[in-house]
Amino acid sequence: MSGTSSTLPGERRLSLLVTVLAFSLPIIFVLVPLAIFLVYSFFSVDQGTIVHVPTLGNYIRFFTDPIFLPVFWNTIVLCVSVAAICILLAYPAAYFLTTLKGRWRYALLMLLLVPLLMSYVIKIYAIRSILGLNGFLNKALVALGILDHPSTLFVFNMNAILLTLSLLLIPFAILPIFLSLERIPQTLLRASDDLGASGLQTFLRITLPLSLPGVASAASFVFVLAIGDFLTPQMVGGVSGFTFGRILYSQFGTAYNWPFGAALSVALAIVVIAAILVGERFGRSRGTTV
Amino acid sequence: MGLKKAFLKLATIGLGIGLMTSAALAANLRVLAWDGYADPDWVKDFTAATGIGVDVVFIGSDDEIWAKIKGSEGQDFDVFAVNTAQLQRYIKADLVSPIDITKLPNQKEVLPRFRDLSQVSGDTKDGKVYGIPFCFDSIGLIYDTDKVKPAPTSMSVLWDPAYKGKILAYDNGEHNFSFTALTLGYKDPFNLDAEQMAAVKAKLVDLKRNVLSFYTTADEAQQIYQNNDVALIWANYGQQQVKALQKIGAHVAYINPSEGALAWLDNWVISKGVRDNAAAEKWIDFMLTKKVSGELSERTGFGNTVVESGSAGSNDKLVWLNNVEDPTKRSDLWNEIKATP
């Protein structure tokens, strides 16, 4: 504590400390772990122990083994579908919210976001009971006369994963779309109206284009969350809903093949980063030109 | 001067107390076990009967036992519980002492299948006994008594097209390969050659097409059972799973398949660093009394080696779980099976 006589060096030291902390935290907790798993992806496993000799074997296996690429591709298609469904459902909801006045708008938004406060696992359990053969959905469809007898279409297959993920992730789509819609200046809409455009024309030529950045970030959000999920496919996917997340997860349990698991994670990370970049690019180019 | 004297006196007393407690600790038997294997009332009875104090430490996983025993080279505990599949690893690492069965009178009274320990795979090495079995459970088959008639006798019922989409199997490559190998009639389900492996894999792809879903926890299986039309469950959690299902009013029963049921078996073993071998033997013998073993089954739902329990009838064939030839290989194949359309 020799520098107490002058405040300046003390302040400088403090700011230096803050800077070091600001840089070191992400480095220690994000970059270093990422680097470690990247390094691991070049190791191999022999008789249950990890061999620390660099090899490309894991990546070669990923591209040549007949099971990984098809599952990888199917999972990407699944998650793009989830993103599309979420957008289609979230957009009208978000649009409806922006038409509300004052306090109602935010009260309703909060209500739509309440599911995020619940445990993820509990929600999957609940959805699984709803989709099951004796579940609410089947009972309702039979009672309404739409089905003759309960159907197994909704659970333990790809449909189930699609439905469950969409349901779980809709709040993540509503929020960015709502924010981008809300940011559209009312003056633009009024000007359009003054110039004689119909409601539909105003929506198609002004509201929709200006809200696309929100849609893009919503889509990339949902896609990224969906593709990284292994629990939902594990719990509702049954025997036919096998996704990349499940393969990845299986490498870390009894298989104890961390290096291969790391290589699969790298493949997943590349897709995730690409999705985020695409989302951000769309989000920015439209947003800044107005 | 006075102060110094007082200080010296205090130090002497302190040293005395220290010596006394360490002497008391030295006499205490140090037990490492899973929760449910050393309940307080048993410990109290044991101390009352033998005058030996007991310190129990509970563990939560096989890896934890290994870490604790290997970490101290067996010096930190006198007796611990370990399953047959794990025991050979401890013998190899010289962490356990051979047990003189003549010092365990109760071992003579155990159920027939546990009397000749050379017949219990994994308990002996070079003619010496290292583990005394005391607790087990089989991985059998749960069936819905309303839907499956007559009662099944073999796991082969899982491939019966009549139950297509009504079967819950367990999501674990290792066990699934082992039980399917037994169903196919292979002698050693834990060491499959390439040809057997391929046959088991093909058989498991067929199984997958008959199955509704693969579960991981007992709770999960129960929830799926409640919301769907399930007739058969491959019961990884054995008796506990049956009892939980019966509690919610399910009409289910349990069998061990005729081709042999996989089963885990926990043993008491004496560590290399045992301080009082006689005390350790007394503990093991005490655990093998009819009272303690019976209570163990009542409280945990697991089978014991002394009194008959729901885990296995006297004629049921049990195949004690062992380490498999290549866990990584089995897990990879299991993924391939799951990815097969």
Image: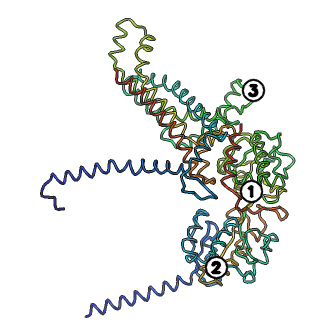
Q: CA distance from mark 3 to mark 1?
A: 38 Å
Amino acid type at circle 3 is Asp
Q: Kindly identify the residue that appears in the image at 55 percent across and 27 percent down.
A: A85
* Position of A255 relative to B109 (above/below): above
Q: Kindly identify the residue that appears in the image at 63 percent across and 71 percent down.
A: B38
Q: Nearer the viewer, mark 2 or mark 1?
A: 1
For residue B284, side relative to residue B10 (left or right) = right
* Position of B92 relative to B20 (above/below): above
Name the residue that disc number 2 marks. Answer: B46
The verdict on a common chain for dots 3 and 2 is no
Quadrant (top left, top right, bottom left, bottom right) of the C terminus of chain A: top left
Marks 2 and 1: CB-CB under 8 Å? no
Residue B135, located in which quarter of the rendered image? bottom right
Residue B340 in the image: x percent, y percent?
Answer: 71, 39
The extreme left residue here reads: A5
Residue A191 in the image: x percent, y percent?
Answer: 33, 11
Mark 2 falls within which chain?
B
Q: Secondary structure at mark 1?
A: strand
Mark 3 falls within which chain?
A
Q: Kindly identify the residue that appears in the image at 45 percent across and 22 percent down.
A: A95
Residue A251 in the image: x percent, y percent?
Answer: 60, 49
Marks 3 and 1: CB-CB under 8 Å? no
Name the residue that disc number 3 marks. Answer: A148
Labelled disc at residue B139 = 1
Q: Residues within 10 Å of mark 1 (few under 14, many from 20)?
A: many
Amino acid type at circle 1 is Ile
Q: Residues within 10 Å of mark 2 (few under 14, many from 20)?
A: some
Q: CA distance from mark 2 to mark 1?
A: 32 Å
Q: Secondary structure at mark 2?
A: helix
